[in-house]
Image: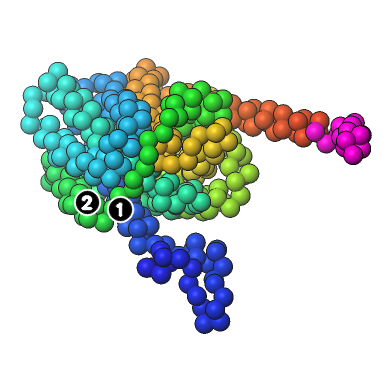
Amino acid sequence: LDQVAQGPIQPDDGVPEAAGEERRRLTREQLFTLAATASINFSSMICYSILGPFFPSEAEKKGASNTIVGMIFGCFALCNFLTSLILGNYLTQIGAKFMFVSGMFVSGCVTILFGMLDKVPSGPIFISLCFLVRAMDAVGFAAAMTASFSILAKAFPSNIATVLGSLEIFTGLGLVLGPPLGGFLYQSFGYEVPFITLGCVVLVLVPVNMCILPKYDSIPSKDSFWKLVLLPKVLVLCLTIFSLSACLGFLDPTMSLFILEKFKLPTGYVGLVFLGLALSYSLSSPLLGLVSDKLPNLRKWLLVSGGLITALCFFLLGPAPVLHIKSQLWMFVLVLVFIGFSLGMSAIPLFPEMLQCAYENGFEEGLSLLGLVSGLFNAMWSLGAFAGPTIGGFLTEKLGFEWASAIQGGWALLSGLAAGIFYIVEATRKSSTSSLQNSPGNNEERTHLMGSET
């Protein structure tokens, strides 16, 4: 590893190894970066997902309606949105490593605090503290994830999609283990134990990451955040991020209640139903990341087809009453599997697409740009995660889960169509420009001018 960090290795015949062979070896810094970011992906997702199987029903006992539960989930996302925007702009001033580690520390402490909420009186006090604690958790989560994306893109500039896709295994693992582990601990030991256990795990990881995570220095850039946001392609990508996150966030406060009511499963088994989505997402993400890096021209069509498939799956999730199909557990789990895969198709290429767009429009390479892009990515994801549970909880309360999930799929349909139209228009424009530049008239005129010059 030290030799790779220093330069090309000289084999016995004196000929340097190919550059491709050198790039396939990871330096010590890259390995430590992968380990640190994998830990935040896993720990943050497992802490986030343990709420799904039991918190909505627990909150109902404490006087929170379905809409309020959705707003509690959405509060996390809204605060995450605001924090990501701010921290993305000031990443270089604060320092990526400090932001990463402090975000983990805050997240661990707040997870433990969330486990104490069942001790407070029911009604307004309980609801208010739920909002406050979730808001604090969002600040820590936003800091850690914004720094994580930036550090990864800095450490792996040429294959960021592959790395992000591979690390989604740990995201998926957190999503896989969170619901069943949370449901089991809740059923066996009560409300407090799931949060205290996982919060302590996060706190243990804090000093470990302080030791192993490399420090990446950078020079602040003059590039404007609004200059990035107002690029037409970035706006389309932001809509895609928002729609995917809204669809995924919709399931948090609504799906467990639907499963309990419709299929009469015990609370401990509800978390197992979540496995369909989490497993398919985490297992397909590395392959999708590799395809995204090796075939960058395919990214746009992954985005489009992923959005359209997600829309269809949400229409079938209930399924929508207009289809007159009886809801069955095996079909519900199968649709979740397809949702996990389609979300990966759209989500994995988004970050490299945004980076490529920024480079094409003259943004300076460096950690400052990575902070802007990762902050914007996390902010739009968080905005969708706010809208999804909030609107989803309201629609479920008024129309039922079947209609609410069908309506929620409209976000994915809108983003898929918008991305498809944009890419078709972009390809047409490029084709027209290319044909004008290579037209026979232009070639003859160029030859005539060259002849007259000579």
In the figure, residue 395 lies in which quadrant?
top left
Q: CA distance from mark 2 to mark 1?
A: 9 Å
Q: Which residue is mark 2?
A: 210
**Considering the image in quadrants, where does the C terminus appear?**
top right
**Considering the image in quadrants, where does the N terminus appear?**
bottom left
Q: Position of residue 438 (x, y in %)?
A: 83, 36
Which residue is at the front of the view, 146 or 79?
Answer: 146
Magenta range is: 437-454
Q: Is residue 114 visible?
A: yes
In the figure, residue 116 lies in which quadrant?
top left
Count of number-bearing discs: 2
Which residue is at the far bottom? Answer: 12
Say whether residue 361 is left or right of residue 427: left
Q: Residue at x 43, y 26 (%)?
A: 225
Say whether residue 108 is left or right of residue 76: left
Disc 2 residue type (three-letter): Met
User: In terms of secondary structure, what is the magenta stretch mainly?
Assistant: helix
Q: Which residue is mark 1?
A: 214
Q: Is residue 141 visible?
A: no
Q: Residue at x 31, y 42 (%)?
A: 96
Which residue is at the front of the view, 143 or 283?
Answer: 143
Instruction: Say which element carries label 2.
Output: helix
Q: Residue at x 48, y 37 (%)?
A: 364
Which residue is at the front of the view, 327 or 220?
Answer: 220
The chosen color scheme is: rainbow
Instruction: Say which element carries label 1.
Output: loop
* Label 2 environment density (alpha carbons within 10 Å; few <14, some 14–19, many ≥20): some
